[in-house]
Image (cartoon, grey):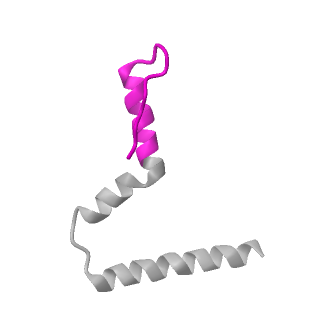
Amino acid sequence: MIRVKARGSESVEQMVRRFKKLCEKEGLTRDIKRTSYYEKPSERRRRKTRKSLKRIQKDLLLL
């Protein structure tokens, strides 16, 4: 659960901006976008394998 406390004389707009940044950092917005529509299990597997292949290629480039 994300909580934002006011810092001194911080305005509401600044608090909202900090809250949005924390949500983005936690990956909350990504989760909401991903679950907002139905994804077939085969597409989910395909996405995960593409992601893992990208990670492997990135690791190989660093070596």
Drawn side of residue 7 relative to residue 46, left or right = right
Q: Is residue 16 above or below residue 50?
A: above
Q: Who's the residue at 49% across and 15% down the image?
A: 8
Q: In this rendering, would 38 be left or right of 8?
A: left
The quadrant the C terminus occupies is bottom right
Horizontally, residue 60 falls left or right of residue 15, namely right
Q: Residue at x 31, y 64 (%)?
A: 34
Residue 60, percent across and down? 71, 79
Q: Residue furthest bottom?
A: 42
Which of 6/40 is in front?
6
Q: Nearer the viewer, residue 58 or 48?
A: 48
Closer to the camera in the image, 12 or 39: 12
Residue 37 lies, in percent from the top left, at 21, 66
3 falls in the magenta region? yes
Q: Residue furthest top?
A: 9
- Whole-percent x and y of residue 42? 31, 86
Q: Residue at x 32, y 81 (%)?
A: 43
> Residue 5 appears at what percent x and percent y?
43, 28
- Residue 8 on the magenta span: yes
Residue 3, quarter of picture: top left
On screen, residue 20 versus residue 61, left or right, reads left
11 shown above or below 20: above
The magenta segment is 1-23
Rendered view: 46 above or below 28: below
Name the quadrant containing residue 30.
bottom left
Residue visible at 37% across and 31% down in the picture: 16
Q: Please tell me how many numbered marks the rendered image carries.
A: 0
